[in-house]
Every structure is written in structure tokens, then in C-alpha cells.
Amino acid sequence: MSPLAHPTAVIASGSGRYADPWHPFPRTSALLADTLRAAGFQVVVDDDVDAAMTRLDDAALLVVNAGDPWRDDASRTNRPPAASVTGLDQALARGIGVLAMHLSVGSLRDYPSWAPAIGGMWIPGASWHPEIADVEITGGTLPDGTPADDFTVFDERYCRLQQLGERSVVATHVTDGERMPTAWVRTYGAARVAVDTLGHDERSYDSAGHRRLIGTLARWAAGA
């Protein structure tokens, strides 16, 4: 994929079965959109997650900011349209960039390519997080040599996520004396994929360091 002057990012924002009582997706998606615009993207926010997967033809970056569709028994009875599953698969095959935010590591469970693409998932009963608080994030380096800064953010720390495949960790946090991944990047076929497990609520976007990390990950994933 050739770099674009103003690549388009589509944010699939949690609503319906992708919403929950704990994550204010409409508000965090709006702040995420502002952050991506500052990083040089044109941004479309789509609050119909499944429909968004069919609207990716002109997008350089798919950003998923959505919740777990299997969080209760009732929600598990719904399934995305076949066209949505195919839409994501085709976008990945052509090399769309992907940025998965926060609980997106527990989202899109009905999409067979999602978990293998992002390289990690929230496992109910095994994954966990401490109480939300100020967190010290230690930055690393992306595969192209771009550095990620250290910063402090008020957010949740996701722990014991299931790793799927190889990945390059670009940010970490420490919980109970153990250093754990906060953000990572990887390739999935032709697609570049970045995962940022931060972003619980609006306070996460008060951190200039977190906003810089989002921009860095998004630009790397989109090849911009």
C-alpha cells in the first residue's frame, strides 16, 4: 500500500451488542478521531460495527473501538452478516492497516480472522485488570526504528491476555512486579496491525503521551 497524504481511517465504534455499561465508546471514539486527525488522517466514525466492515474499500486504516459481543448469553445469539465477515477478510487480504483499541482485544469474536490478525485476546476468567489508576508506561521501538515515548496515563492495565503468534511489543506496564505488554505491532499477511490496550474512558486521552502513541501506531499500521 502506498503512503497517502491524508489516508482515511474508519473507526468502528461500539454500539448495540458491541456496547457495555463500562466503556463510553461514543465519547472515546470522538477523542480517538481527534487524535487521528492530528496525526494526519481523514476520519470516519461508524457506530454500526458490523456495517463498517463492508465500508472499508477506500480506507487505509481500520480502527476498532468496541466491546465484547459475547459478554452475556443473549448477545451470543446474534451473528454478523456474512458480508461483514467477508468485508474484513478482504480488507486484511489487500493490506489495510488495523489499530485495535482497549477492549477490542475482546471484540469481533464472530469474525474468524480477527483474533489471529491482532495477535492477542482477552480470555474471560483468565485475563484481568487492577482498579483503574495512574499507570507508568514504558515505551520501546517499532520495527521501523520509530521510538515510543514513556508516559503516564490514567487507565486500566490489561493483564494475562492470550498471545496468538509473534508480535513486537512497543509499550509495557508493570503489575504485581511483572512487566506486561501494553501495545504491540505485527503483520498478518499483507496487513500491518497495531494493538493499544489503553483507552478505557476519556481520561486516557488526557495523556499527551498516549495520544502520541496512538498516532505512532496508526501511522505505522497504515504505512503512512
Image: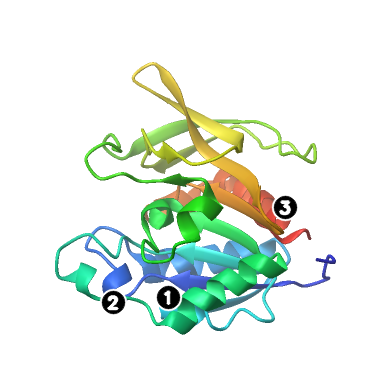
What residue is shown at x 72% (from left), y 59% (from top)? 190
Residue 133 shows in this picture: yes
Secondary-structure class at tag 3 = helix
In the rendered image, the quadrant that contains the N terminus is bottom right
Type of the residue with mark 3: Trp
Q: Which of pointers 2 and 1 lies earlier in the amino acid sequence?
A: 2
* Label 3 Cα neighbours within 10 Å, binned few <14 / some 14-19 / many ≥20: many
Q: Which of pointers 3 and 1 lies earlier in the amino acid sequence?
A: 1
Figure check: 51 above or below 161: below
Toward the left, the furthest residue is: 73
Which residue is under mark 1?
A: 49
**Residue 177, how many percent across, how many down?**
38, 16
Report how far apart the C-alphas of labels 3 and 2 lie in the structure. 30 Å
What residue is shown at x 46% (from left), y 53% (from top)? 115
**Residue 195, how many percent across, how many down?**
54, 49
Which residue is under mark 2?
A: 16
Secondary-structure class at tag 1 = helix
Q: In the rendered image, which quarter is residue 142 located in?
A: top right
Report how far apart the C-alphas of labels 2 and 1 lie in the structure. 9 Å
**Residue 84, how many percent across, how many down?**
47, 79
Which residue is under mark 3?
A: 220
208 or 66, nearer to the observer = 66
Whether tag 2 and tag 1 are in contact, CB under 8 A, the answer is yes
What residue is shown at x 43% (from left), y 66% (from top)? 111
Type of the residue with mark 2: Gly
Left or right, residue 33 beside residue 23: right
What residue is shown at x 80% (from left), y 41% (from top)? 144
Figure check: 214 above or below 170: below
Type of the residue with mark 1: Val
Residue 37 shows in this picture: no
Toward the top, the furthest residue is: 177
